[in-house]
Amino acid sequence: MLWFYFSKRRYAMSNNIIFIESMRKCLLRIIGVCLFIMLMNTVVLAQVKHQNYFTRAELHITSITATDGNIYSSILYSNLQQTDEQSKPCLPVKYVKLIIPADQDVEKVLIKDTSKVAITVPFFVYPAQPPIPTSTSYEQLNFVPPDSAVYGSNQPYPSDIVKVVHKGYFDGCNHIVTLAVYPIQYQPKSGKLSFFSVVDFELELKAGKMPIMAGGIRSRKNQGIYDGKFTNIRTAFQKTFGHHFTNCSDSISLNIRTLLGN
């Protein structure tokens, strides 16, 4: 009987050891999977890609006579804004807003692919002028002549076809980056334009310095007001910029869909 008792205890202890070892291996597997997922998320969040397409039919080049008496080439693109740095060439620009992880920042912009054609214009491109006031007492402003340093050079303007122009946070934890995409580069001295029909770029990210802040705690009344305002903003944001996020990674797209309420 004593022998049977000790044999039973040894058997139970052996089973416990096997169970503990099995649990240890299982736990190690779980930790390994978690670390792998975290690593994969880090890799995914390290890049944001975006593609832009422009058509030649939407590009309009005309000749205009300015108040200084000179003829200039006017470069317009349908539904795009114009650069507004006074005395510099006035060219089309597309502003793209992208959401990146709240704890990261843009290290640099990498141009992955482009497709361009060369166009020659007969006159200098019209220089950007001061904005026209809407006041009824508005007086005609003096014409701002072309910047001789830019127009006397054959260096492409702008020097970069994609650049970060603004970074900010919405509601504390949504990091929104605004980029300017230029479908036209201009070489003033030779009168050549480079029209980019495709601009495919990627943001290389780095750890950010801005501390992440969660949205504030609001009273029920204030939260109701906030929700109403945010619904209007979110709808407008989705209609205007929603299509810019289709090429983001799955994890970033999830954050975007959360923001847009999808």
Image (cartoon, rainbow, N blue to C red):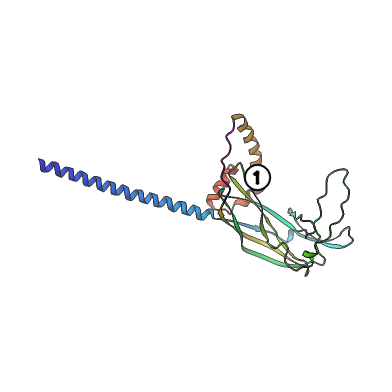
Give the amino acid at mark 1.
Answer: Phe
| Residue 116 to residue 107: above or below | below
Residue 257, image x, y percentages: 57, 45
Which quarter shows the N terminus? top left
Residue 243 among magenta residues? no
Residue 99, image x, y percentages: 60, 49
- Residue at 57% x, 42% y is 213
Classify residue 4 by image quadrant: top left
- Residue farthest to the bottom? 190
Residue 9, image x, y percentages: 18, 43
Of residues 135 and 104, the one drawn nearer to the viewer in this rendering: 104
- Residue at 19% x, 45% y is 11
Residue 210 among magenta residues? yes
| Residue 224 to residue 131: above or below | above
Residue occupied by mark 1: 237
Classify residue 85 by image quadrant: bottom right
Residue 262 visible in the snapshot: no
| Range covered by the magenta-colored residues | 208-218
Q: Is residue 224 left or right of residue 157?
A: left
Give the secondary structure at mark 1. Answer: helix
Classify residue 192 by image quadrant: bottom right
Q: Is residue 114 left or right of residue 78?
A: left
- Residue at 50% x, 53% y is 42
Residue 92, image x, y percentages: 74, 57
Of residues 146 and 96, the one drawn nearer to the viewer in this rendering: 146
Tally of numbered tags: 1
Q: Is residue 184 left or right of residue 74?
A: left
Residue 15 visible in the snapshot: yes
What secondary structure characterizes most of the magenta part? Answer: loop
Which quarter shows the C terminus? top right
Q: Residues within 10 Å of mark 1 (few under 14, many from 20)?
A: some
